[in-house]
Image (tube, rainbow, N blue to C red):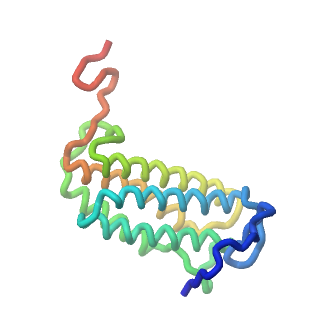
């Protein structure tokens, strides 16, 4: 288990940090950028959860936040080998897919694109979705340059789908819909 007694180590004062395998790298490296983007997505989920106390979706997002910590641990050890390291895998992705299917089964079909908004919880879920999409783009860029567990990219892709459907569920069918070429409640010019 992890034990953190000292938070301020001064080890990063010169602009470098340590990876999970002990390697020292620059804090502006693509790998650290990817880990940071995943951390930002996780923080965005924390904001969504502020609105969900007592809601069954809260427990679902608690699992996702733990998954994102696992994904960060995955990224902090270079390579795509699972040998002796915590890695995100197919089971993580399958759980997200099952959550999406269950939530989507309760929703009316979409007849237009959805604009971010609605309830405060749904609006924060949309914002978390965009943070997950950004994390996915950054991890894809990292994977183009270095070995990355392919399941990490799949997980982030599924997560943005998950957060889109969650935002719809949190709006309880009251989606804010895109009106092509016009304004809501009005016609096109």
Q: Position of residue 188 (x, y in %)?
A: 30, 16
Quarter in which the N terminus is drawn: bottom right
State which quadrant residue 100 falls in: bottom left
Quarter in which the C terminus is drawn: top left
Residue, far top: 189
Considering depth in this image, is 160 or 150 the residue closer to the camera?
Answer: 160
Q: Residue at x 28, y 64 (%)?
A: 53
Considering depth in this image, is 13 or 189 the residue closer to the camera?
Answer: 13
Q: Is residue 20 above or below residue 187?
A: below
The reply to whether residue 79 is in sight is no
Q: Position of residue 10 (x, y in %)?
A: 75, 70
Q: Is residue 96 above or below residue 137?
A: below
Q: Residue at x 72, y 60 (%)?
A: 27
Q: Position of residue 174 (x, y in %)?
A: 21, 43
Q: Residue at x 48, y 55 (%)?
A: 132
Considering depth in this image, is 161 or 55 the residue closer to the camera?
Answer: 55
Q: Is residue 9 above or below residue 122?
A: below
State which quadrant residue 21 falls in: bottom right
The reply to whether residue 25 is in sight is yes
Q: Residue at x 28, y 35 (%)?
A: 177
| Tally of numbered tags | 0
Would residue 14 appear left or right of 58 to someone viewing this image? Answer: right
Would residue 110 appear left or right of 128 to someone viewing this image? Answer: left
Residue, far right: 14
Q: Position of residue 79 (x, y in %)?
A: 67, 72
């Amino acid at each position: 288990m992890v034990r953190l007694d000292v938070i301020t180590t001064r080890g990063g004062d010169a602009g470098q940090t340590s990876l999970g395998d002990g390697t020292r790298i620059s804090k502006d490296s693509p790998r650290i950028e990817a880990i940071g983007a995943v951390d930002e997505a996780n923080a965005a989920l924390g904001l969504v959860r502020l609105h969900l106390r007592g809601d069954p979706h809260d427990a679902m997002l608690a699992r996702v936040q733990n998954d994102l910590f696992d994904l960060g641990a995955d990224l902090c050890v270079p390579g795509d080998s699972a040998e002796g390291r915590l890695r995100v895998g197919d089971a993580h992705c399958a759980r997200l897919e099952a959550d999406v299917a269950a939530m989507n089964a309760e929703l009316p079909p979409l007849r237009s694109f959805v604009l971010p908004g609605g309830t405060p919880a749904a609006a924060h879920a949309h914002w978390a979705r965009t943070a997950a999409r950004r994390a996915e783009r950054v991890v894809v860029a990292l994977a183009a340059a270095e070995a990355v567990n392919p399941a990490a990219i799949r997980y982030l892709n599924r997560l943005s789908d998950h957060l889109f459907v969650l935002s719809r569920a949190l709006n309880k069918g009251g989606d804010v819909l895109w009106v092509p070429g016009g304004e809501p409640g009005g016609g096109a010019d």
